[in-house]
């Protein structure tokens, strides 16, 4: 479009994006008859869509029926039980302040709905199974999410140790990559593979450095069969040495790690 409809839609787009931080926009529902698709603005769910017709520009709010509209901006007929729309014809202008207030109300509504969905999903989630020694059974996966699921399922005092280690590693290895392998959180870097793993046992949490023999000082745990790996076992009530653990983590992250195969 290169007429009044284009200018109108562009103005409303700017008002939507100015109304609240974090609003995203995309083009959905592309098809041969409409290859450009439909503009969609979202924040915790769809706020509204924008469409241009021969004689008007239509902004349809997905949950408009639940929004306060004291200014009476919704003026389009036949929008159904939940949706409400604003029709803008040539020469008409929508009050900017009132329209932004409507968009912000939609953002708040979506935020509340998202929280309810999250709470419902969490309440329906199956409890994590604890294996031998109280070790959480978490499916293999890459990224922070499976690691956080493991930490949240660590029983008793072990959960606090897991959180402490996770934050300490993030702080001292900004480019850290995470995964869960064999029901244990793994931490590594793209350059040097995995350098540390965490595992729950009955009375303690085992923190294993895959190249522990190269660390200074060498972590206390290890056997002749473990070759390069060394570890430290952290029991309930043990004093945590932030400085020493940070030193080990920073050293280990720079050394060749374990590929995981």
Image (spheres, rainbow, N blue to C red):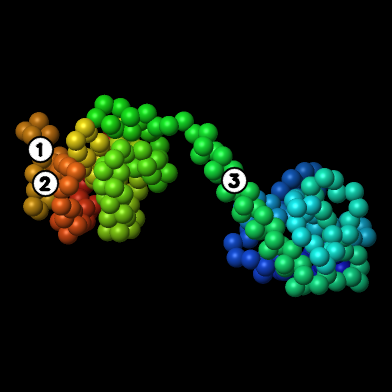
The residue wearing badge 1 is 222
Q: Are marks 3 and 2 in contact (CB under 8 Å)?
A: no
> Residue 135: in sight, yes or no?
yes
| Foreground residue among 1 and 77 | 77
Q: Quadrant of the C terminus?
A: top left
Which residue is situated farthest in the left direction here? 224
Q: Are marks 1 and 3 in contact (CB under 8 Å)?
A: no
The residue wearing badge 2 is 219
Q: Residue at x 70, y 55 (%)?
A: 47
Instruction: List x then y, in percent, for residue 143.
Output: 40, 44
Judged from the image, the secondary structure of the residue bearing numbered disc 3 is helix
> Dot 2, how many residues are within 10 Å of its Cα: few (below 14), some (14-19), or many (20+)?
many
Instruction: List x then y, in percent, for residue 83.
Output: 80, 50
Q: Residue at x 57, y 49 (%)?
A: 115
Judged from the image, the secondary structure of the residue bearing numbered disc 2 is loop
> Dot 3, how many residues are within 10 Å of its Cα: few (below 14), some (14-19), or many (20+)?
few
Which comes sooner in the sequence, label 3 or label 2?
Answer: 3
Instruction: List x then y, in percent, for residue 227.
Output: 11, 36
Q: Residue at x 26, y 42 (%)?
A: 158
Q: Nearer the viewer, mark 3 or mark 2?
A: 3
> Residue 142: in sight, yes or no?
no
Q: Residue at x 10, y 40 (%)?
A: 221
Give the Cα distance between marks 1 and 3: 48 Å
Q: Nearer the viewer, mark 1 or mark 3?
A: 3
Instruction: List x then y, in percent, for residue 253.
Output: 24, 52
The residue wearing badge 3 is 116
Question: Where 112 falls versus 55 (above or below)?
Answer: above
Which comes sooner in the sequence, label 1 or label 3?
Answer: 3
Give the Cα distance between marks 2 and 1: 8 Å
| Foreground residue among 199 and 35 | 199
Q: Are marks 2 and 1 in contact (CB under 8 Å)?
A: yes
Q: Quadrant of the N terminus?
A: bottom right
């Amino acid at each position: 479009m290169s007429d009044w409809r284009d200018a109108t839609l562009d103005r409303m787009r700017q008002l939507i994006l100015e109304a609240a931080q974090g609003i995203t926009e995309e083009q959905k529902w592309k098809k041969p008859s409409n290859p450009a698709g439909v503009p969609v603005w979202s924040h915790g769910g769809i706020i509204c869509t924008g469409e241009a017709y021969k004689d008007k520009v239509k902004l349809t709010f997905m949950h408009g029926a639940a929004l306060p509209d004291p200014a009476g901006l919704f003026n389009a007929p036949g929008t159904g039980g939940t949706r409400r729309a604003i029709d803008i014809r040539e020469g008409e202008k929508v009050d900017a302040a009132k329209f932004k207030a409507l968009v912000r109300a939609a953002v708040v509504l979506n935020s509340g709905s998202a929280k309810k969905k999250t709470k419902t999903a969490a309440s329906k989630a199956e409890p994590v199974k604890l294996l031998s020694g109280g070790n959480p059974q978490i499916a293999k996966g890459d990224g922070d999410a499976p690691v956080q699921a493991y930490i949240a399922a660590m029983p008793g005092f072990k959960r606090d140790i897991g959180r402490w280690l996770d934050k300490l590693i993030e702080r001292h290895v900004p480019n850290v990559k995470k995964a869960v392998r064999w029901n244990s959180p793994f931490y590594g870097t793209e350059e040097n593979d995995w350098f540390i793993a965490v595992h729950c046992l009955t009375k303690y949490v085992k923190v294993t450095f895959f190249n522990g023999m190269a660390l200074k000082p060498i972590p206390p745990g290890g056997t002749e069969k473990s070759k390069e790996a060394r570890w430290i076992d952290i029991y309930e009530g043990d004093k945590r040495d932030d400085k020493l653990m940070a030193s080990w983590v920073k050293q280990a992250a720079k050394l060749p790690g374990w590929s995981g195969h």
